[in-house]
Image (tube, coloured by chain):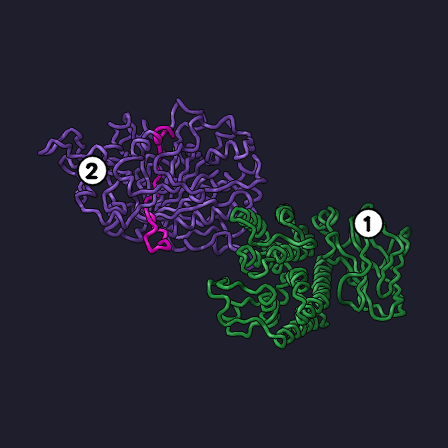
Chain colours: A green, B purple
Amino acid sequence: MSRRLLAALSGGGLIALALTGCVPNTPTDDAAALSVSITDDTCAVSADAASAGAVTFTLSNEGTDVNEFEILAEDKLRIVGEKENVAPGQTVGYVAQLPAGTYFTACKFQQVGAPVGLAEFTVSGESAAISDDEQELTDAAVTNYVAYIRSQVGELIPAVQSFTDAYAAGDDDLARSLFASTRVFYERVEPTAEAFGDLDPKIDFREVDAVADGLDWTGFHRIEKDLWPPAPGALNSDGSDATVDWAPSTAEQRTAFADGLVADVAELHDLVTDDAFTVSLGDISNGAIALLDEVASGKITGEEDWWSGTDLTDFAANVQGAKVAFGNVEDIAIAHGEDGAALVDDITTQFAALETLLAEYGSIEDGFVAYGELDDGDKKELSDAVNALAEPLSRLTSTVLGVS
Amino acid sequence: MDAPTTDDAPDDGDRPVRGVSRRGLLGLVSAGAAGLAAGAAGGVALASTSPLTAGAPQTTTTYPFYGEHQSGITTPAQDRLHFAAFTVSASLDRAGLIELLSDWTAAAARLTAGLDVSEDGALGGPDIAPPDDTGEALDLPPSGLTITFGFGPTLFTGQDGVDRFGIAARRPPGLERLPRFAGDALRPEWSDGDLCIQACADDPQVAVHAIRNLSRIAFGRASVAWSQLGFGRTSSTSTAQKTPRNLFGFKDGTANLKLEDRSAVDEWVWAGGEDVDWMRGGSYLVTRKIRMIIEVWDRQQRLEQERVIGRSKGEGAPLSGGTEFSEPDFATTGAAGEPLIDPTSHVRRAHPSNVGGIRLLRRGYNYVDGSDPLGTLDAGLFFISFQRSVGNFVAVQEAIATDALAEYLKHIGSAVFAVPPGARENEYIGRRLFES
């Protein structure tokens, strides 16, 4: 075993092996199996703590449809282990390798939507060496990142349904209140959607981009302009008259845009839940920087959510997505020696600085101040923090892939 | 890569590069790859100078970065400027500041030698990593690039009054924001800064490349507060250079300090024994962004333009007679007994005899930032001067703030920086501020 790898792994890094097929099923004697009682709307784990190392769960699905069990990192976003496809009436064993730390357990009825029964789960004690195989680390990173993408898109579906239902029904107050929070699930994984070519333009194109590309303008931002209609004389982000070639949607058009968005995110869900769907290690680390690039080129300028002014929510979701992607590969970077460890330190520090700064303006849960309320000094401060993070983050891929 | 005659300490241009910090190392240097020298083929004259820049150095010129004084001060003024003022990040501490200065020093030594910013440079790193060097100076000759660093008053004591870097007590007594002058219309977006970098070169892309790469190195530690491009030097700093013209169409800098006049340079440019220890051999840099009211000026009769300046427009001779380099005689009068050089003229007000003998080393550049919404040229002079004390500049500016020319000028930016002495090899710029 590589001494370097060992040192890195015992350094408090978080590695979880979710590949049940690959995990050595050798829990220590004192680690009694925990039971997880799953129903359609509960997810009860028999204990909220365990010793570091291999933690065995016995899952029983007492509900009416397929379910899954997830172990999430402290951010409640990044998946560090999951067991999918637990059928009703089934009882299965699942082993997760968990170093000391704070986690959350949850289930997911029908394997879409918000986590059910989210509960804190503490792992303490000495972390045993977990893996001496870089391929295993890579496999775990890929598996967990794919699971994360699926979970976000899975949450997107019901959120979009509620949002578009309100919009189509003309309940604009409700639709406005759901706009930013619905987009969060999309913004966290946007580079993945972009990889599918024509889906992102249909879901997320801004008016000026759709016009420039000669596309029918659909998706979130089409709906946004109906919900926050331009005042007379208002301008689009490119300075053109906002009411030229645009009119408030009729009831029929609203229904069409609503149905279209629902269908497009459903297609996205089909694509990412396909058995053949996977990502490479480079896709993950490149996804992290791509999300920061989204922030630097779109959100900082306030052009993304031109009518709603909810850019900071997108901004924060992009940053969360980048951090999850980074979290999936950071141990691999650390395993590549001192330079990798120093890079991880730098990136971690800058993520924290950016999160602290963003928190001054609100939170995803409670909403952010409208982007128009920020002055140039505020924007520059945010831009500086993004640059400070993006510069080291842009070197993550070559470090993770071990090219120097 | 021989250095031309300059006042800089004689130094071998070909030198090992000092190591950069751990943090800088991540981006700047990865092991293995051979260094790439962008257009640093020494000795071959790659380009001839154009008639417009006659007297300017050949574009293959390099100036040593290390030496007694920083280069870019008495160095014969290059044709192009990119000047940047920086704000240090709120999280930067003393060790981080020293690390930044060390990284900047290592990078500047390479860039001024015509090399990429790091050994890996623009092309030598991993193909799945962003290149260390941004690459736009590949294939360009060194172009006489100089890089000059300065420290603003707010580096010593922050806006909040906090001594963040433990250097407040070492702040030179005279290093303070300039007082308000008549005619000031200063804008914060063109004023002040914790740190500054002046990059001068005969090719604008080389100067921009330097600022761009140095800014990139600083991400997370310092960010650009404002920056300015300049073209067409408005001063000569060597007797070998022709006097250029400013955007008013007049020769500018005729009576400037010239590097060949070493005793005057020593007297008026370099900080000496009267100053704090670490500044000896350094200088004080003042920038003033001066918008010219171009369209109004252009409508003035030539005689009026000459009265305002105090010199002829063609030759640049003082209105008291002679040639460009004749001393103006303010006592000479015309037929009606009026002085030939108007007492309110720019030449009269700025002349050493009017300001207690003070002389400044001017090193400014014309700028054009496009046009404003009214369609008028957004243009003027990005004034730069070096002097042994800030007070010397203040005295001269007070004398000219209400001269006849002021009517056509609007000062929209102002900054002052302490420029530490040059670094020796294996030393970072400003070391003596932190370690002596």
Q: Chain under label 2? A: B
**Amino acid type, label 1:** Thr
What residue is pinned by disc 1?
Answer: A122
Residue B12 lies in quadrant: top left
Q: Label 1 crowding class (10 Å Cα cut-off): few <14, some 14-19, many 20+?
A: many
Location of residue B353 by image quarter? top left
Q: Which chain carries label 1?
A: A
Q: Is residue B371 magenta?
A: yes
Residue range corresponding to the magenta coloring: B367-394
Q: Which residue is drawn at 25% across and 38% down?
A: B404
Q: In this view, does B360 lie to the left or right of A89?
A: left
Assess whether mark 2 and mark 1 are in contact (beta carbons under 8 angstroms).
Answer: no
Question: Callout 2: 10 Å neighbours few (<14), some, many (20+)?
Answer: many
Toward the front, the furthest residue is A232
Residue at 45% of width from left, 42% of height from top? B188
Do marks 1 and 2 both belong to one polypeptide chain?
A: no
Percent position (x, y) of residue A22?
Answer: 79, 62
Q: Could you say where residue B308 lies in the image, as x and y percent from the top left?
A: 22, 39
**What label sits on residue A306 in the rendered view?**
none
Quarter of the figure with residue A24 = bottom right
Label 2: which residue? B310
Figure check: B274 above or below B50: above
Mark 1 or 2: the one toward you: 2
Q: Is residue B266 left or right of residue A235?
A: left
**What kind of residue is marked 2?**
Gly
Instruction: Please say whether residue B310 is visible from this viewpoint.
Output: yes
